[in-house]
Amino acid sequence: MASARNKGTSLAKGPVGIVGMILLAYGVTALIFGGRSFTTQAIDGTVNGETWLGLEVNGWSDLLFIGSGALLLFGAPLHWGAKTLSLVVGIVLAAAAVISFIDGDDVLGIFAANGTTTLVWAIAAAVLIVLALLPRVGGAKRSDEDRIADRQDRIRRDGSTSQDSARNRGSMSAR
């Protein structure tokens, strides 16, 4: 049974790794060349940052990009890891985009953002949530005839069926 789950190619692993590399690369370059300020005006204040490649970022925004990218890269090698972390990071980026859109200037006075930053977060969130829903493909589907032949082989090899085994266990416990 376990081997049947592992068959097929994951549609999520590659794209999640690519998105992770892009987010990580942008975050690192933004931390070096863009906003490096870690000042905050937490909860209701306004925090501004520097513009790097059209996005307004501060140190905290850079760390959001770096952390998101790193998590996606760590999860990308495994199908379930890629899907799980893609969903988690997608939800976090979606929340950041919604809060930034509502506030207009930043996210909770911590992460600097402009309209372009909000748009990038929203697009990344949408892509990651879609990637989290992708299945494995190309796995060999077993026909009913194959399953019947496997069961007959098992019966010939073991000499009993699972029903016979259950009956034998039941009669032994009655003794």
Image (tube, grey):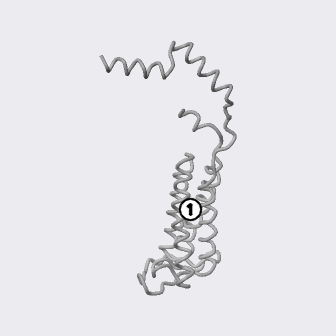
- Where residue 51 sits, quadrant-wise, is bottom right
Residue at left 51%, top 60%?
Answer: 88
Percent coordinates x, y for residue 10 in the rendering: 63, 45
Front residue of this view, candidates 26 and 95: 95
Can you say whether 107 is above or below 45 in the image? Answer: above
Reply above or below: 19 against 103.
above
Q: Residue at x 54, y 67 (%)?
A: 65
Please state if 43 lies on the left or on the right of 124 as rendered.
left
Given the image, on which type of amino acid does mark 1 rest? Answer: Leu
- Horizontally, residue 85 falls left or right of residue 42, namely right
Q: Quadrant of residue 152?
A: top right
Q: Is residue 54 left or right of residue 111?
A: right
Quadrant (top left, top right, bottom left, bottom right) of the C terminus:
top left
Residue 164 higher or lower than 89, as above or below:
above
Q: Which of the image's four quarters has the N terminus? A: top right
At mark 1, the secondary structure is: helix
Q: Give me the residue at 65% from left, 39% from top.
A: 8
The image position of residue 99, as x and y in percent, is 52, 78
Q: Which residue is mark 1?
A: 24
**Residue in view at x 61 percent, y 49 percent:** 13
The residue lying furthest to the bottom in this view is 45
**Location of residue 9 in the rendering, given as x and y in whole percent from the top left corner:** 65, 42
Q: How many marks?
A: 1
Q: Which of the two residues, 118 or 138, is positioned nearer the viewer here?
A: 138
Residue 153, percent from left and from top: 60, 17
Q: Nearer the viewer, residue 59 or 98?
A: 98
